[in-house]
Image: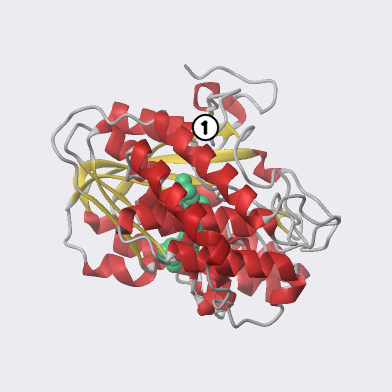
Amino acid sequence: MNQPSLFYPSEETLPYKRIRDISWDFRGIPASEGIYRIHPYPAMFHFLVVRRILKEYSRKGAWVLDPFMGSGVAATEALLLGRNFVGYDLNPLAVEIARVRTTPLEVAQVEKTLAFLAEVYPEASEGYIPSVPNLTYWFAPETIRGLARLHTAIQQIPDRAMARFFWVAFSETVRETSLADAKEFKLIRRKSRPSSEVWSMFVRIVKKNVEAFHTFTIPSHPKVHLSLECANALHVLKTLPEESFDMIVTSPPYGDSRTTVAYGQFSRLSLWWLGYPEAGNLDSRLLGGHRRPLHPDLPSPVLYEALQKIADKNRKRAEEVFSFYSDLWEVIQDMAPLLKKGAFAFVLVGNRRVKGVELPTDKIVADFFEAMGYVHEATYVRRISNKRMPAQNSPSNVVGQRDTTMRYEYLVHLRRVS
Ligand SMILES: C[S@@+](CC[C@H](N)C(=O)[O-])C[C@H]1O[C@@H](n2cnc3c(N)ncnc32)[C@H](O)[C@@H]1O
């Protein structure tokens, strides 16, 4: 099972029970296959990683928690495998995508609704225009008019689940027809105008998403409870009863949104159009969004070794990095007691570099959980070949300076013992 790879040092040389295990790579199978073709999202779980974890380490009817559920890959896999699921994310766009992916609809009904929209769209009012600065920097005038008409049309769909399906297609249409480069996570202007106009792009996306549902057959099993909420993991986990979950499967952000994956920037234009005016400051509300002064209370010596090296070069950067881990530690303190004793947690992270210093987030996460009564079983190192996230980040936050630490991700396997 733990086969050595040419691309990574062999198992023996890896510290902290890290195992380079190519059986977790699922090479050649894209993470955005089947139902996961509905709306892109940064740093999505590979569905086969979650499927394997759920099959091997949980039973039907188990209760699974993901406090950073993003676009709901764990939720969808839980539904497919008959596990109950509770998930949170602070990004409202992520929650909408997760809800759509876990709510299969009758194809005939979707087609009927699309026909209704086709009738309403040409005459629909152009009254809805988000009142945000820079709208015309990101959208051509005719695109703004088209999106406004589409917005008015979708508002007339009475059924909530059906309307949500079309709002998510609307969000993809916003991405594809804006002047921002849809392939980038950060907001960067495209070099040329998008080739398609709003309605034809929307129809293409709806058809793609309907097709994605074709691949989605939920086997018959007792009804599964799914709860997908927009909430801050820093607050909401405190409200849940202890020992109420049989498994945790989660992937927190890999660092603050400003210098790693910018979930807020990725979602901003869609959120404007979906009616979330506060979308502009989402990144500052996500983990690590607020700078905190350095203090020595986090239970991970390797974190402080790395922070010292960064602080020697730039103290402000060290504080920014610290703020992220400080938030993560707070969430882990609330999350750890929610799992039943003897049960497993799987936490998928990326190890990035800041100022040339590698941050071993996998080891730091293991340390944090160990301080909360868990044992670290192992960390499986998998290569990211087909996941939608930048394989290279800019450690210095300087455009053009690149780093390849994010080519691998780390699945930290933990068990609660006390
Ligand atoms: C690595 S992504 C998760 C991707 C997810 N596994 C999927 O399959 O799509 C991390 C997520 O954490 C969310 N997040 C960041 N800070 C948060 C917080 N304080 N509370 C809840 N969610 C947060 C981000 O919005 C992002 O969706």
Label 1 packing within 10 angstroms: few (<14), some (14-19), many (20+): few
Can residue 298 be seen here? The reply is: no
Relative to 334, does residue 105 appear above or below in the rendering? above
* Foreground residue among 340 and 124: 124
Image x and y of residue 408, in percent? 62, 38
Residue 215: give x, y in percent of width and height: 41, 28
Does the numbered disc 1 mark a residue whose Cβ is under 8 Å from ligand 1? no
204 left or right, relative to 141: left
Q: What number of labels is visible?
A: 1
User: Foreground: 407 or 130?
Assistant: 130
| Residue 22, horizontal then vertical, whole percent | 55, 23
Is residue 203 found left or right of 250 in the rendered image?
A: right
Residue 387 in view (yes/no)? yes
Q: Secondary structure at mark 1?
A: loop
The colour scheme used to paint the residues is secondary structure
Residue in the image at 30% along x and 64% along y: 334
* Left or right of residue 57: residue 195: right
Instruction: Name the residue at 73% across, 47% down.
Output: 392
Give the residue type that dot 1 points to.
Glu
Name which quarter of the figure residue 87 lies in: bottom left
Which residue is tagged 1? Answer: 33
Using the image as rendered, state which of residue 198 and residue 309 is in the foreground: 198
In the rendered image, residue 327, in percent from the top left (x then y), is placed at 46, 69
